[in-house]
Structures are given as C-alpha cells and as structure tokens.
Amino acid sequence: GLGIPNMAQVGKVPPAAVDLAETLGSPALAALVRLFVLTQTVPRGDVEGVLEPADLAGLQALDLLRDGPQDTYYSPAFVYPVAGFVIASDRHDSPDGSDIVLASDVVFPALDAGTLRFLGLIPRTPVQDALDLCSGTGVAALLLGRTAGRVVAADITPRSGHFARFNAQLNDCPNVEIAVGDLYEPMAGQTFDRIVAHPPYVPALDQARIFRDGGTTGETILRRIIADLPRYLRPGGTLYCLAAAWDAAEGPLESRIRGWLGEEEHDFDVIFAQQEDVAPERLARW
C-alpha cells in the first residue's frame, strides 16, 4: 500500500504519496502509521478524532507522543514492523525538518538492509540459552526468543538497553533478558548454545556513532567477540555474525580469525560466506 518493495525503503515514501485511510481501511491506523512509521507531524484533530482519550494519555505517558509545532502531535520514536515484531528505535530526523544532531548512543533502526540480512542468518532451530551481542533494538534477541528457552540481549549503551526492554515488553517476550555492559562483561561466568552478533564494523578514528564505528580498521569489536568465544560458547554451540572485515598485510581474513581464537582455534569449525568484496580504493573513498 505504501508503494515500496519492503519496509527498509519506508523513508522513501513521499508524505502525500498514498491515501493511508483508504489504503489501510482505518482512519485510526492511518494516523498511527503517519505518526510512528512515517514519523510525520499530524494535526491534533486528526489524532484526537480517532484515538480514545485513555489511549492518547497512554501514548503520552510512554513518551511516544508529544506536542508538536502548530497544533500538531509527533512521536520522538520510530516504530515499525520487522520480522513479525513491532520495533521502536530512535528517529533520525527532526519533526520540523530542521537539522538534527544525533547523540553518539543513538539507537539504529532495525529496518536497515544489513540488519534484515543479519536476521535472515539466525536459525530457527531450538536451543536452551542464546545471546545477542551489540543488540541495539533487541530485534535479534526477540527472534531468538521464538526458539530459545532463554535469551540475553546485551549492548554497551543504557539507551539501547532501554529500547530493547521496551520492545521485549511490547512484543510480549518474557524469556528475553536485557543486559547493559561491554560485550560479554555482564554475562561473566555464563555460557550459551547460540550467540549472534551484528557488531559495529565501520573504520573510524573516533566513536561518533557507537552502533557504527568499529575502531581504526573496523575490526575492534569483531575481534573481541571472536577472541572470547572459547569462554562463552558451549561445546556444539555456534556464533552467527554479520560484519565487514579485511585481508591484511599479516594474512587473509580466514587465517586472521583463526588467530583471534587463540590456542583453542582447533576446537572450532569456521565457515565464511562472502556477501560483497570491497576494493581498498573503494573503502578509502568511504
């Protein structure tokens, strides 16, 4: 109904592209889509005319609805469907269209093409204990929760923990726990049957965006995740990871990752699936 091939393209929907009320068959749903999915400012009358006062008050109490400019409402969050869940994250634009300065701990939307590819890697077979590292919105943890007895969603920023906790409650996922700390730190002494990670991997001299920047070569977080696997992954367990990494002067990626595993590297089978090959010149331009 929005004229896009998938929800990853939702930001490309022009404000007046479709008559949502007619397309969706519900003025109330149309108002909510405009507020939360398209992140538009919506006239107060359009919202108050379709929502019950108690529902309106509830959205305001959750800080999902705020007074906007010129007698409108807007949402400070971006809320959208993905992988069968309803997920909330930070919006990356301002309600009035002005320039916005994003905080370093901004929570990245789970609709990015890379995130959707990552979710497609996660198996649907049952396990007892699972861990989602660098969890952001927690969407991978929610997906793991469909087949795992217990899931931990871990991220270094309290803001990500806040969104992951909200998303777990919103989607009624009581078997998903939230942990805030540096990678495995909050899970010291625990082991898992399945670990998944979509870590920051963009080469960066500083950490302007925690969800994105992965150190000078982009591999800092990835290397630490792999190096500590022998301590946190149970025998027979598996790590599923989507990231960028490089061949380097000291050797190709395959041998370098083996080296990151340390003395226990022979206990591991390693499978690489290449999505894209990036030339050094192209990387330098990025």
Image: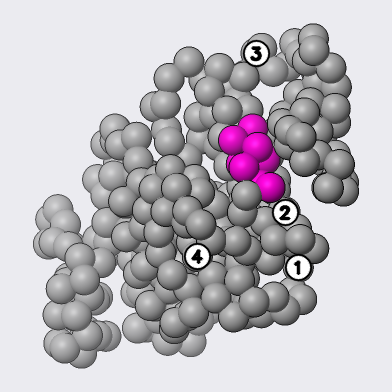
Magenta stretch: residue 225 in it?
Answer: yes
Magenta stretch containing residue 167, yes or no?
A: no
Q: Residues within 10 Å of mark 1 (few under 14, many from 20)?
A: few
Depth check: give the residue in front, 33 or 61: 61
The type of residue carrying mark 3 is Arg
| Residue 159 visible in the shown view | yes
Labels 4, 3: front one: 4
- Mark 4 touches mark 2? (CB < 8 Å): no
Residue 140 visible from this viewpoint: no
Span shown in magenta: 222-230
- Tell me whether the residue at label 1 lies in contact with that at label 3, contact meaning CB atoms closer than 8 angstroms: no
Residue where numbered disc 3 is placed? 285
User: Mark 3 falls on what kind of element?
Assistant: helix
> Marks 4 and 1, Cα distance to the nearest angstrom?
16 Å
Q: Secondary structure at mark 2?
A: strand
- Alpha carbons under labels 1 and 3: distance apart: 35 Å
Mark seen at residue 123: 1
Left or right, residue 198 beside residue 244: left
